[in-house]
Image: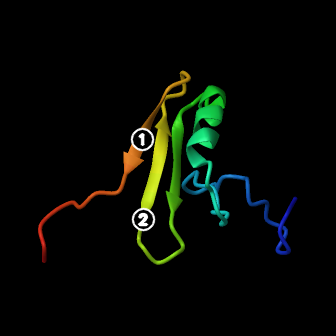
Amino acid sequence: MPNEDESDPYVPCEDDGTVPAIYGKWYDSEELASWLKQYCEEGGKMIFHSIEGDGDAWGWEFDGQGSMRELQLCSVGEWI
């Protein structure tokens, strides 16, 4: 169903292919990813970010052939 501004929250952006975020509690995110992997024909990523102020981020990458692997946020580079 479109939003008030007539945009559809599930349609990828034409510029970069990302899909607008939907927020809420995702207690079963791994189960959702396991279900979704069987339908990802081209592969892709599903990323979750905590909105509770703890900075947590996690997700999964899909290979388009029915497999997935875990993604994690990690530090990169030196302190500046």
Whichever of labels 1 and 2 marks the residue nearer the N terminus, that label is: 2
Image quadrant of residue 42?
A: top right
- In the picture, the quarter occupied by the N terminus is bottom right
| Residue sitting nearer the eye, 15 or 5 | 5
Toward the top, the furthest residue is 65
Q: How many marks?
A: 2
Identified by mark 1, the residue type is Glu
Q: Where is mark 2, residue-wise?
A: 56
Residue 70 is marked as 1
Report crowding for label 1: few under 14, some 14 to 19, many 20 or more residues within 10 A (C-alpha).
Answer: some
Q: Is residue 33 above or below residue 39?
A: below
| Residue sitting nearer the eye, 50 or 41 | 50
Q: Position of residue 51 (x, y in %)?
A: 54, 73
Residue 47 is marked as none
| Residue sitting nearer the eye, 31 or 48 | 31
Identify the residue shown where x is 44% and y is 54%.
58
Q: Position of residue 76 (x, y in %)?
A: 21, 60
Image quadrant of residue 34?
A: top right
Q: Position of residue 75 (x, y in %)?
A: 23, 61
Q: Position of residue 23 (x, y in %)?
A: 65, 66
Q: Is residue 13 above or below residue 78?
A: above
Identified by mark 2, the residue type is Asp
Q: Is residue 75 left or right of residue 34?
A: left
Q: Is residue 7 left or right of residue 32?
A: right
Q: Is residue 47 above or below residue 43?
A: below
Identify the residue shown where x is 64% and y is 54%.
14
Identify the residue shown where x is 61% and y is 39%.
31
